[in-house]
Amino acid sequence: MTVTTVFVSFGVAIGALAGSMPSVMRQAGISPETFGLGLTISTFLTVGAMALGGQIARFISNRTVLLVVLPCFALTLGAYLMAATPLWFFIAIPIMGLCFGLTDLFMNAEAVALEHELRRPVFMTFHGGVSAAVGVMAVAASWIATQWGTWAVALVAALMFALSWIMVARSIVPRPLAMGKSARISTLPNKQPLMLLGIAAGLIIAAETAALMWSAKLLDDIAPSLAAIAGLGAAFFGVCNAVVRFPGDRMRRSLGEMRLMIGSLVVAITGFVALVLSHSYVLSVAAFASTGFGLALLIPSIFAISASLVPENRAGALSFVSLLTALPRILAPLAFGVVAARFGTAVSFGLVAVGLCAALMLILAFAKRHP
């Protein structure tokens, strides 16, 4: 229950970002291109924090990191949501990126360790909590931001983070630290499996980020009069993610992760192509739902497989994979913002479809070489 609460808080943060994005852009006075630059800087620090996580895990427990970072996350998220100038925006979003990275890595490391202890698949259920929270908070944030202001969105998120901090302090115990040569990624005889998974994960996370962060902007472009519900794209994305993730552990057992991942990528690619071609509000919302279905199982599966390859240091394995996600994750928001500013938000989603086709090739290569 405690780990689930942390995942839900993480989802609330993503939903708050996605749903309130048009409001933040208007109040801070920034363009899509500027927002893309800010998101790129934030992503760079997110990836950097996750890349350092493997070293941090050798000295500090998952519990301690979460107790320190959760309050910082709540504060920086609030600062971002209430940004009133471009300078304020550019100060808040990089620090928030650091908090995103550390929370992401160490909550997943704790979840994978728990799955290992229980000796049954439960990892997808935690990620289902993220998706459900994203879905609810995205549409709630867009409505709250237009009715009361982004400060109210920040308050709701802060309350959820406070609850998760209390749960972690009361219920999670420190785990033994990763020690010895076997816990070092540098001693692995073959890093190719982690490399293939890491690059594919970067392309997939870039697609998730695009769907969540730019969905409200696309819907706002199509129907400005419906700004109060512009979070519907991210909401349907998150809800459809959750619908697949909650039974995802049973699907992992019955179908196998490789088959699930390949089929999921095909569905996601189809959804992003539909976003490029559609000019309808309803069809675009449906396309976001399709991408939610398609992307749901991919990152949890990659994280679970990666952690299983290095059981002596699961956080280190996730850290190594996260480092390899850097290039697509960092460049994608900037490229998306530039294309959106010049050709429209819908056209930018075509870049995402191309990136996912490349991810599909990498997953097929992994399945062939490392069955």
Image (spheres, rainbow, N blue to C red):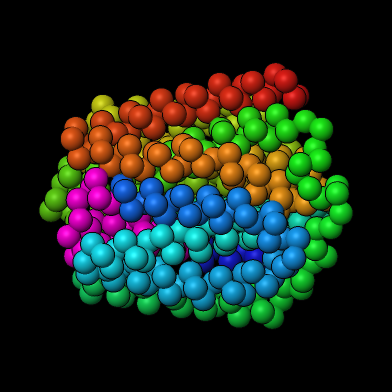
Percent coordinates x, y for residue 259 in the rendering: 65, 27
* Magenta stretch contains residue 358: no
Choose top left, top right, bottom left or bottom right for residue 6: bottom right
Percent coordinates x, y for residue 299 in the rendering: 58, 42
Q: Is residue 247 above or below residue 55?
A: above
Which residue is found at the position 31% from the left and 38% from the top?
Answer: 336
Residue 335 in sight here: yes
Q: Quadrant of the C terminus?
A: top right
Which residue is found at the position 77% from the left and 71% from the top?
Answer: 174
Point out the residue furthest to the left here. Answer: 225
Q: Is residue 217 above or below residue 126?
A: above
Which residue is found at the position 62% from the left and 69% from the top?
Answer: 66
Looking at this view, is 291 or 61 the one in front?
Answer: 61
Which residue is found at the position 59% from the left and 74% from the top?
Answer: 68
* Residues in magenta, as a range: 12-35
Q: Is residue 241 left or right of residue 194?
A: left
Q: Quadrant of the N terminus?
A: bottom right
Q: Is residue 135 above or below residue 67?
A: above
Residue 234 in sight here: no
Looking at this view, is 337 or 156 the one in front?
Answer: 337
Percent coordinates x, y for residue 93 in the rendering: 37, 61
Q: Is residue 291 left or right of residue 187?
A: left
* Magenta stretch contains residue 13: yes
Percent coordinates x, y for residue 43 in the rendering: 44, 50
